[in-house]
Amino acid sequence: LDRHKLKWNGWGLADKTFELGERADALWKFLADELAMDSLDHVPPRALEAHAPSPSALAESIAAELAAVVGAEHVKRDPYERVFHSAGRSFRDVVALRIGPLPSVTDAVVYPRNTSEVERILAIATEHGIGVVPFGGGSSVVGGVEPRRGRDQSSVLTLDTSRMNDLVSIDDTSQTATLQAGIYGPELERKLGERGYVLGHAPQSFEFSTLGGWVAARGAGQQSNGYGVAAALLAGATVATPSGLLRTGVFPNSSTGPDLKQVIAGSEGAFGVITEATMRIRSAPERRDYRGYLFRSWDAGVEAVRDIVQQGVPIATLRLSDPDETYFFGTFSSLGKTRSGARRVAEQVLSQRGYGRGGVFLLVGIEGAIAKVVGAVARSTTICVGHGAIPIGTGAGKRWYQGRFEMPYLRDPLLDRGVAVDTLETATTWSNLGRLYQGVREALHGALDSMDRKGLVLAHVSHGYATGASLYFTFVYPLDRTDPLAQWIRLKRAASDAISECAGTISHHHGVGTDHMEWLVTEKGELGMRLVRAMKTSVDPRGVMNPGKLVL
Ligand SMILES: Cc1cc2nc3c(=O)[nH]c(=O)nc-3n(C[C@H](O)[C@H](O)[C@H](O)COP(=O)(O)OP(=O)(O)OC[C@H]3O[C@@H](n4cnc5c(N)ncnc54)[C@H](O)[C@@H]3O)c2cc1C
């Protein structure tokens, strides 16, 4: 993807925005009321020129060595490329890009085409003691692509993988595909689709993230219940490290000690650059069915979701919104619209029967062969109804599926109006889910109260497993324009401490980056961290790879 076609300071395509249309005024009023804000004035974002990156610290002689490997046109040092590659898309990143300042700017961006070019770039970086930040789509939300310089490093390079976008081979018999790691989601599914296959990994960032980034950050797609998380889809990989090439075989299973694929998944560019990955693929689904259910309470919904997963109903997507998220999205989708008489009556009846405010919405998505889909719809409906739900059909499910990549476009205009939106996610066992849910909600509300700010804390359960599930939180609050970072750090810290105290993982699918490093030791223990550090030093003794991420 041409970087100039993308927003350098926000989400997605440069020429696309979230279409609010006639709903705009109603949305601003709704948010102003919910967040007790007097006004939502628009402040234009900082211009690219205002970031004024200092001149690149990369020596001309080293730039020439890199150009000899990839071609001079693939070594970029102009302000657009340097600023574009100096932040991911976390709330902290977007605040830095739109309000400023950027904590650091990369010295150059290099675009290799294949494994051998990556190996040669890493050799140059190692020889000259330069940091290298692997960059796929740059959609990291944990500070994973921030260009930090390691100790004694005079400069840092960003290695953009987006020219490495080939489908290398497909093994039809084994149902695996080997692809270069810089391929973007839509291109990957298009190429597999031509042969009748899907990978099925579709994070909300699907359109602007890459295979390598999915694996490196141990991501989870919206259909992870059916297709598996990125780490589970990984069947083999090639990684260029400063100490040489690491290749795993492709085995259905192996008892040869620790599984190195599971070291590569989650390595976050700190060990090396994943240049190729072999992924499990499957036949394209004959049918997709997305539908909704309303429950009277959060507890009833959670029990239904647990039953669906533990009984092995083959679903693809599960998303159970808590009462506040159900209310928020219900209101959001009807903003600025006149409700018909029939709709008003239906809502009244639902409310009288206990499905109004306090009720929760469950989305169930099922994909696959027609017989499988039909059977799974029947089984999940029976389970939901058994827990007191009302099935509300496929309308809401279809709308969710159609708009599943659109919401991120709303964050930038909200920020410009002084409304902050961030998300965080965790996971725990079913038996601990209630405690973690309450703990994080209370921590976020408590932190907002202590700042004398009214905010919204929305949550949903998704990515269910036999033993537990993920909890995903969205928090919305009035931005403190004078020090947005300090305000965010207080909220993030409160939530992360609560996650640790309530025995959740500090991240189910966003990764560690810079933002979660502090809480990693509580989760893995000192000895566990020593093991991770030892792995890093054995492949990257000079600390070239992604300085300051995952482990110090
Ligand atoms: C709006 C939005 C929605 C999101 N939704 C989801 C979601 O539903 N599920 C989910 O899992 N995540 C989600 N994310 C987070 C993010 O998209 C994922 O972490 C994604 O996997 C990152 O892919 P990327 O190609 O953009 O990687 P980048 O952001 O470029 O990099 C992520 C990390 O991986 C490293 N890296 C990248 N490529 C390589 C490589 N080839 N070799 C070695 N290291 C590499 C980078 O150095 C960095 O540490 C979302 C992010 C945003 C902004």
Image (tube, helix red, strand yellow):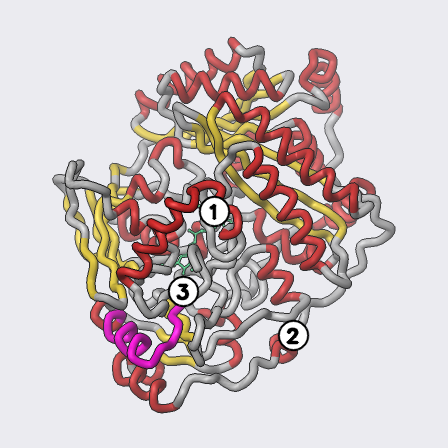
State whether residue 4 is above or below residue 402. below
Left or right: residue 516 versus residue 187 is: right
Question: Which element type, helix, strand or loop, lies under badge 2?
Answer: loop
Asked if residue 1 shows in the view, the reply is yes
The circle drawn on residue 47 is 2
**Camera-nearest label, 1 or 2:** 1
In the picture, the quarter occupied by the C terminus is bottom left
Q: Residue at image x 40%, y 67%?
A: 133
Q: Which residue is mark 1?
A: 520
Residue sitting at 44 percent across and 28 percent down?
464
Provide residue 104's location: percent of width, then percent of height.
54, 72
Q: Which residues are magenta?
A: 118-135
Pointer 1 or 3: first along the chain: 1
| First in sequence: mark 1 vs mark 2 | 2
**Element at badge 3?**
loop
Where residue 544 appears, x then y in whole percent?
36, 69
* CA gap, disc 1 and disc 2: 36 Å
Q: Residue furthest right?
A: 38
Q: Amino acid at mark 1?
A: Leu
